[in-house]
Amino acid sequence: MNIVMISPGFPLEQAYFTRALAQTGAQVIGVGDQPLEALPPEARENLAHYEHVALADEGTVLRALSGVAEHARIDQVECLWEPYVVLAARIREHLGIAGMSVEQANWFRDKEQMKLVLDRAGIRTPRHASAGNAAEIWEAAEQIGYPLIIKPIAGAGSADTYRVDNAEELATVQTMIGHVGQMSVEEFIDGEEFTYDTVCGNGDILFENVSWYIPRPLQQRSHEWISPVTLVLSDLSDPRLADGIAMGRAVIEALDFTHGFTHMEWYRKSDGEVVFGEIGARPPGARTVDIMNYATDGDLFATWAQAVTAGTAPPVTHKFNCASMFKRAEGRGRITHVEGLERLLREEGEHVCVVDLLPVGAQRRDWRATLLSDGMIIYRHMDLGETLRLSDRFARELQMYAE
């Protein structure tokens, strides 16, 4: 089987998916805008062939792969990086290969189309409208009412996403989103935020995961002092998650998703109502696949690869609650020192899986531009209460400083 992998080495975790794909016995043909020598070894050493092209230039990509197809049959096209999910679908249609169509790919990329499909399926979505200019944003705000959320139609994560509580705030936000094209204007849902993640094969859901954002991402991106947490929950039978999981399964069915990774976000309001957020035809970012692996003692990279090549995979079950916490240094410039780490590792080290903090002397990252911030830790425990206790300790006692 010859499989095209779009962007096999970037973002970094794509290299592990590429390696897992090759380990199934597939011949992996990479297509990316990094030079071959710049690819991580996990990707570079597992490619049968590589086309170095500008992924933003669709015509060049199609011509390059048409050339490859003259010499080798292309059986499948895979993409796990959100900006190029539609490109992967265009390649399939151009070469006559089965898989997600352009129309279906757009359901996952265009938040307005996505919600319209789900509205027709009877799934509870926020009240919403698309807007391409200032007048349309104001009109949508009047129809939906405050508070509301404004975010890019084809965005990912919380970039260029704002809560707006009144007309004055809307006027301010409009000066900040002028560089964005089409926007989604939505009802603000006040509630806890969770994920529903799947690996699917041959039309079946082979693996399910629920993560809990603490606090919700919009708050994480609004306050520098917060240490954001993504917590993979081990007990998917918890009644508080039941409606969210049921909704996630209904979303997968409504969007006719048959194979690959999905990452969905949903809300649970104080009255128990669950509301859809958005979904991507990709794995979650910010090393969340790593957290899933520590939560299951499994290999979700391999599970995905087996699902998309064979349509099935051995079962993977949760054993631990597992969390990642991203730390943000106090101050500007370069990291000068870290406090509390040695004590915490001495007292809680048996529960810690990863410590990946910027070293002393390193330049701080822009916390607004990357959730990874100035580093992360991953920790796990079979008991949820104990996992939350660990989160509290690492948030309060682990501190980084810069100047």
Image: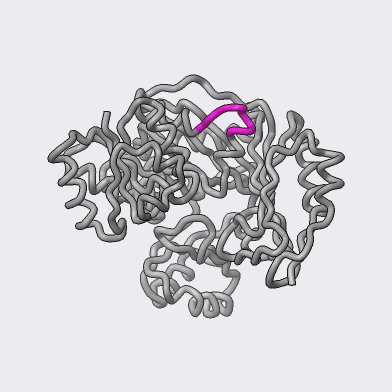
Residue at the (51%, 66%) spot, across then down:
160
102 vs 162: above or below? above
Residue at the (66%, 42%) spot, across then down:
231
The answer to whether residue 293 is left or right of residue 142 is right
From the top left corner, tell me how far across and down residue 295 is, in percent.
64, 32
**Residue 348 occupies which quadrant of the picture?**
top right
The residue closer to the viewer here, 391 or 196, is: 391
Q: In the orientation shown, which residue stands out farthest toward the top?
A: 314
From the top left corner, tell me how far across and down residue 42 is, in percent.
46, 40
Q: In the orientation shown, which residue stands out farthest toward the left?
A: 70
Count numbered badges in the picture.
0
Q: How is the image coloured?
A: one colour
Q: The N terminus lies in which quarter of the figure? A: top left
Q: Is residue 297 within the magenta segment?
A: yes
Residue at the (60%, 70%) spot, across then down:
165
The residue closer to the viewer here, 232 or 255, is: 232
From the top left corner, tell me how far across and down residue 310 is, in percent.
35, 23
From the top left corner, tell me how far across and down residue 261 is, in percent.
44, 37
The residue closer to the viewer here, 64 or 299, is: 64
Q: Is residue 49 within the magenta segment?
A: no
The answer to whether residue 360 is left or right of residue 243 is right
Where does the magenta region start and end? 293-300
- For the question of whether residue 365 can be seen, the reply is yes
183 vs 76: above or below? below
343 vs 384: above or below? below
Q: The C terminus lies in which quarter of the figure? A: bottom right
188 vs 117: above or below? below
**Residue 274 occupies which quadrant of the picture?**
top right
- For the question of whether residue 115 can be seen, the reply is no
